[in-house]
Amino acid sequence: MSADKLPVLPECIFQTIFESSPGSLLVKADIPCFTILAASDTYLEITSSTRELVLGRSFFEVFPDDKDFEDETNARKVFTRVVKTGHKIDVPTYRFDVFNRATQKYEVRYWSCCNTPIFDADHKVAYVLNTVVDITGEVQAKQAAIESEKRLRLATEAAALATWDLNLKDQQFIYSPRLAEIFGHAPETKMDLAQIRCQVNTDDMRDIVLKAFKEALTTGNYLYEVRIYWADGSIHWIKTQGIVLHNDRHEPVRMIGTILDITESKRDAIRKNDFIAMASHELKTPLTSIKAYLQLLAKKLLPTDDSFVANALSKAGNQVNKMTELVHGFLDLSKLESGKLNLRIKAFDINKLIDDAIAEINMISTSHIIAFNSTGVIIINADKEKILQVIGNFLSNAIKYADKGTRITIKSEVINGDVKVSVTDEGIGISIKDQANLFQRFYRVESDKMKNISGFGIGLYLASEIIQCHKGQIGVESEEDKGATFYFSLPLADQVTL
Ligand code: ADP
């Protein structure tokens, strides 16, 4: 037997091979009948038919033409062309619904077909070999992907979001036309990553973008807000959000995400902030005068036998103090928002500061038992006034949110090179859900117990920002109705004397 010649197989062996081949059907080239001569087991299985049903019958009798699909993929046309031209014809995607005997219903099926002519001794097409592969799964997955992409595109367009995709290997950057618009260009403008980064404010690029990028490679998430410049010199704000995609070896390979133009909301926030700053600044002077006049009045009238006068003076003093605290809070808030919270760092003893905070709070209220066992001298480097403000906020909250007569315990302890200061009360406590939001600006717990307790929800936000500016940690441990412990920790100064 020569190497390039197939052996002549006995018909029964040929039949066995054919019947066990994947998705094959042999039809006679008897236009227009195309009588079925052989069918493989797989073909019968995927078309939900049997050998008895198909053999010796016209292809179109067994698999009637679907009049809805009278296009170039129509089987009758394809078979006829194969016979007439003698060329093999592939139909990569072909819809042919199959009747499912079990459910008695037609099922949508997609096929990839190949129609090969088989010639007789006179070189005339005698048969057509129709081989099919069921690709319904692939087609439906592709359709679902197209659908979901369409839905995503609609959603991003409605939200005016730009989408982007960065290849981390070659820095290739693909983005939607909206991105060019957000950067002040016509939607069809082509830009690469370097050009886009050139428009970002230099400080923001160094302090925010590059840091966020580095962090994203370890955390997997990318989120920041920065200023960008348009060609006309105007400043705009963008918010970028994204995730990192990894390959099988867990190496970061791509980053995908969205960009939103947040210029309007930023401008609103800046306007609001400017207003708060201006209003609080304007209130400071009259408040200082009222306080001075009250002190003068007190000097002139006190001590007095008139209990009404004494009481009114003390209440007016308390109210002015409360208002001064509030105005200072708003001033700090506006300084924070505009990044002007200047820290005056110096070394001091935190335990002495806690004593001062207790003395200060005792001047306003003596309704609770405040316990503090000083542990000697603990020196830290920080802004003393600001840290006093944080302890003061913890203490005044403990008084505000716990019943009169209950105990407030302050602790300061050295743990792993940090000092941890905690304030524990026996008050209403905070649910786990609320604990997650407590340090956000203007956040207040909404509950019946809170109805008669006034506040603005800025104290803990300021405290958290102050501690973060000092590279420290702040937190809370609590259970509803079981009191709360608010704490912060700060690094110790170089020499610690205990
Ligand atoms: P304010 O007390 O002015 O509302 P804060 O920022 O100081 O603002 O506190 C935010 C919220 O946290 C409060 O509204 C309150 O719901 C909750 N909270 C703070 N301290 C305590 C505490 N010691 N016990 C229970 N809830 C507290």
Image: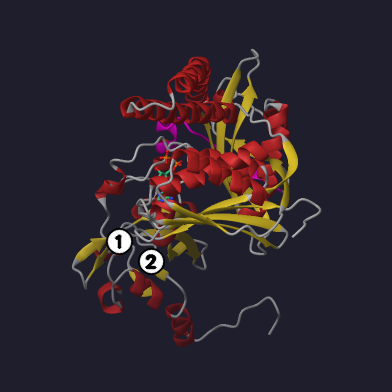
Residue 12 in sight here: yes
Tags 2 and 1 touching, CB below 8 Å: yes
- Indicate the position of residue 461 as horizontal and vertical percent values: 51, 40
The residue at 63%/45% (across/down) is: 353
The residue at 27%/78% (across/down) is: 52
Q: Residues within 10 Å of mark 2 (few under 14, many from 20)?
A: many
The residue at 36%/50% (across/down) is: 404
119 relative position to 443: left or right: right
* Figure quadrant, ligand 1: top left
Quadrant of the rendering where the C terminus is positioned: bottom right
Q: Tell me: is circle 2 under 8 Å from ligand 1.
A: no
| Residue 322, image quadrant | top left
The vertical placement of 306 against 433, above or below, is above
Q: Secondary structure at mark 1?
A: loop
Mark 2 highlights which residue?
28
- Indicate the position of residue 190 as horizontal and vertical percent values: 64, 27
Q: Which residues are magenta?
A: 155-168
Disc with the residue nearer the chain's start (2 vs 1)? 2
249 relative position to 102: left or right: right
132 relative position to 371: left or right: left
Q: Amino acid at mark 1?
A: Cys
- The one nearer the camera, 215 or 306, is 306
Q: Amino acid at mark 2?
A: Lys
- Indicate the position of residue 267 as horizontal and vertical percent values: 51, 21
